[in-house]
Image (tube, rainbow, N blue to C red):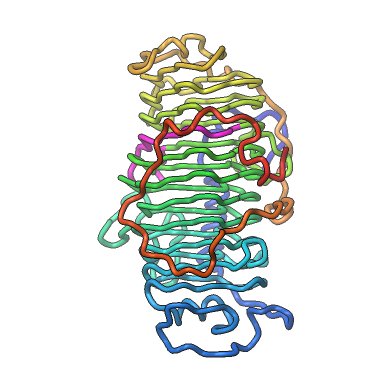
Amino acid sequence: MGKSGAADPLAQLGRLGVVIAAATALLMAACGSAGSDDDDPSTTAPSTTPAAGADLVRVPDDAPTIGAAVEQVNNGGLVLVAPGTYPEEVTINKSDVTLRGEDRNGTIIDGEGSRSFGVFVSADGVRIENLTVHSTLFYGVLVTGMHDENGPLAHGGPGYTELNPEQFPPVERFAINHVTAYNNGLYGIYAFNARHGTITDSYASGSADSGFYVGQCEECDILVTANVAERNAVGFENANASDSVMVAGNRFSGNRIGLTLLSSYQEAFTPQRENLVVGNLIMDNTSADSPAHAHGGFGLGVAISGGQRNDIVANHIAGHPSAGVVLSNAEDIPALDNQFRENVFGDNGVDVADTSATRAPTAGTCFETDGAATSSPTTLLDGPCPGGAGPASPDPGAVPEVITPPGISFLDVPAPPDQPNLADVEAIPDPLPATVELPDPADFAVPDTTLLSDRAGTP
């Protein structure tokens, strides 16, 4: 999937179309089959059988598999899973259900390198908590309204470029908390055509697209906070998720690209716009122990391709031999009116670069940096906030060339260290609220290099 040698800085900012196109055919045909193991609790006979519609279903005590437990549990109930390895695909299509592991590091949904996904959520109000999902072909955890009776729809199918909300209404209300997703073929934790949700205190590595992904929603009302992404092609990616996405206090370090904000004609709701990216550590995204980015991206901190009116505030962006921030167009969609305030840059090939094509020039960009910064063109830093500068004269050669190491298979990426557990696993929670209570951005200062380092496997 990858390539060696100097990466094309324009190609670095593209979507992962090569990987996704190849995956589409597999996804339509892939159908996981459960394995067996005499010592695996998922295959032992249940000791009791609760009445249909139980509020609490324990695996394996009440049901032999997680899928069987989901069939038994009430709407609003809890599926509580004991430590063990569960070789299955889990679909949750009941509202307000919580799927929770008793031990985050010991309750494992294993795709065995052959199943399409670990957990697929198509119902409103679902929580996924305190477990691990690994070795799936495409998605570790997927929350989406894009599905039919056979499961999630592959990228490029109906409802992507032109979305019919009546045919594919978004999932409303979701929470992914204390989840570890590693060695999944495309995405670790993926929210698409979903709104009013949170992704918190989770970990993702080994994804050939991105560790965390939020896409295709308007008035999204999504919070992504206190997460760690490392050894992915991209740590966090947003394509066409707009208006109210807050990405705060995360560690996106040790990937190939730290964070991307993309407009894409392959999905509905172009252009991407109005995210708040605040208080994140985006550092040393130079991982060789990771899957290759489909277009050779490497050594980049933040890439904004056709993204508009985003606020990038109080982030620590350092250690990227290519560039700390790259602005570019997405086909004919320019990067417009993005604000950069109070960020700290350091040890980047260039701190900020504009590589846009002349047919879709960047405009309205503003910078107020906390310290010195370098840019190409040099006028890029001249626009004060708010307001910004007019169209610049981009320099496609402004980003230093770097040698891109070959990627490794997503299945060969080193496993993560143990992650912290959820404190209370027994309680059945109240339903999720209709909207997310977003934190005050002022609570997020520029982080130092130790942010969430106790959860990271890379320095």
Image-quadrant location for residue 446: top right
Quadrant placement of the C terminus: top right
Nearer the observer, 252 or 58: 58
Image-quadrant location for residue 105: bottom right
Percent across and percent down for residue 325 are: 53, 25
Q: Residue at x 30, y 45 (%)?
A: 219
Nearer the observer, 124 or 15: 124
Percent across and percent down for residue 114 are: 64, 67
Q: Residue at x 67, y 67 (%)?
A: 112
Nearer the observer, 412 or 100: 100
Percent across and percent down for residue 257 are: 60, 36
Q: Vertical placement of 437 versus 26: above or below?
A: above
Residue 383 visible within the image:
yes
Residue 296 visible within the image:
no
Q: Residue at x 58, y 36 (%)?
A: 258
Q: Residue at x 36, y 34 (%)?
A: 274
Lateral position of residue 268 relative to residue 250, left or right: left
Percent across and percent down for residue 359 are: 39, 23
Predominant SS along the magenta part: loop
Residue 266 included in the magenta stretch of the image: yes
Look at the image and give the residue range highlighted in magenta: 263-282
Q: Vertical placement of 454 versus 178: above or below?
A: above
Residue 211 included in the magenta stretch of the image: no
- Residue furthest left as drawn: 166
Nearer the observer, 132 or 155: 132
Image-quadrant location for residue 55: bottom left
